[in-house]
Amino acid sequence: MAEGDMGEFREDVRAWLEANCPAEMREPVRGESDMCWGGRNPAFKSEAQRRWLEAMAERGWTVPDWPKDYGGGGLSPAETKVLRQEMARIGARNPLMSFGISMLGPALLKYGDEEQKKRFLTEIARGEIRWCQGYSEPGAGSDLASLQTKCEDKGDHWLVNGQKVWTSYADKADWIFCLVRTDPQVPKHQGISFLLFDMASEGVSTRPILLISGYSPFCETFFDDVKVPKDQLVGALNKGWDVAKYLLGHEREMISGMGLGGQSDSLGQALAAAVADDPILRADVARFDVDQMAFRAMSERFIDELKVGQAHPAQPSMMKYAGTELNKARHELVMAAGGSDALEWESERSNKGKAAREWLRTKANSIEGGTSEIQLGIVAKRILELPGG
Ligand SMILES: Cc1cc2nc3c(=O)[nH]c(=O)nc-3n(C[C@H](O)[C@H](O)[C@H](O)COP(=O)(O)OP(=O)(O)OC[C@H]3O[C@@H](n4cnc5c(N)ncnc54)[C@H](O)[C@@H]3O)c2cc1C
């Protein structure tokens, strides 16, 4: 369906959302505990949150542009955009936060076999399995292809031994998508495979890592003689690097979304009272609002191009860099506007230091999903075609 013929579809979407999106799910998300991550043992914050996820999953609208056969809504890019716009219009929350949707799903759609797609994509769409990402290791971050987690072919199963680090929510996840070394004899990019397994498997253990914000969103993850069924390798043996890179593009696209600033239209409006008497801060906030508008326009164009397969492969790096820098700048300004009060850490009045903790959390934005330096290197080489190593 073309953009211009969307009237009827838009009306249907609007009516459906009106009837099915509970009032509570139209309120802004106040923090991480307000988000729904699904999983084998889902922790719903309220009945409204559960109903909203079930209604959206039933319609296939947790993943509106995936095929219906795999639990999606089968919508075209133009229809998907209308749905997003109508959800934004009423402030409807995303029904499901999920690394399955934003990272693994696209990789499975491209590289998974039919059985893997039917099984895993459907579970992801319904929010039944919570996933974590096993890429980084103590000796492999920016240089990810140096990873050493060993995976041996034992005939009727794979045997995995090694360690991952910075694994977000590994202690809460049901399954992991994991990069493993299946051939140590060949050049490093050519001996990696992409494996899925259950975090409840014997031999998997996790140890949470504490951040300066006081939160503990990630873990060290250990594999000791973990047995994995043979049919859980995605793509061809030793070709996992292709899957890994494709997934990283989607991860960077997801992370870049933090530049959009959620449901607040203008930082200036949000901070109006605090900045009214401070011309320097007011100018900084105005500059930020203009940058955010430019980022939103760029982001909309990027998503449109991506959905029809016309985005440059290195564009997620550019968006990730721009979006995370913007998010860091936003929280710097919130702290500046709050003055010394904003540093308050424990009281109920400060909502247990929400502003300060969120500001500290943004320090990791330019590291997670690949550092800013690495993104700039990719942009220099692949988009600007500058010479270099
Ligand atoms: C909040 C958070 C969540 C994360 N979640 C996950 C997860 O769920 N799963 C997962 O697998 N990983 C996760 N990570 C890990 C993340 O992907 C790595 O931290 C990141 O890729 C950087 O690797 P490193 O920490 O080993 O740093 P290093 O690679 O050691 O880099 C150190 C510094 O050197 C710079 N540097 C390195 N190489 C170059 C180069 N070639 N050119 C220029 N500068 C360079 C870097 O930019 C950086 O400043 C997470 C990280 C954070 C902060």
Image (spheres, rainbow, N blue to C red):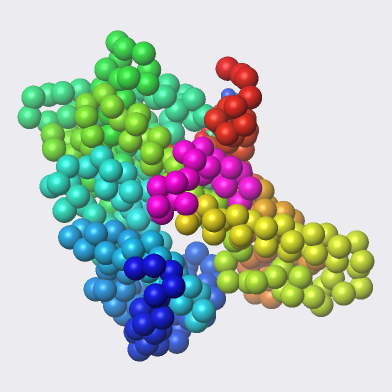
Q: Position of residue 256 (x, y in %)?
A: 55, 51
Principal secondary structure, stretch drawn in magenta: helix
Front-most of 347 and 327?
327
Q: Quadrant of residue 191?
A: top left
Residue 317 belongs to magenta span: yes
Q: Is residue 175 left or right of residue 209?
A: left
Residue 202 belongs to magenta span: no
Front-most of 218 and 72?
72
Front-most of 225 and 270?
270
Residue 153, placed above or below residue 63: above
- What segment is highlighted magenta in the picture? 305-323
Any part of residue 17 in sight: no
Report the residue at 63% width, 48% height from top: 322
Residue 388, placed above or below residue 347: above
Which quarter of the image is occupied by the N terminus? Answer: bottom left
Residue 214, placed above or below residue 340: above
Report the residue at 83% width, 59% height from top: 284
Report the residue at 18% width, 39% height from top: 232
Q: Residue furthest top?
A: 185
Any part of residue 307 in sight: yes
Q: Position of residue 69 (x, y in %)?
A: 17, 60
Q: Is residue 257 left or right of residue 306?
A: right
Q: Position of residue 245 (x, y in %)?
A: 40, 35
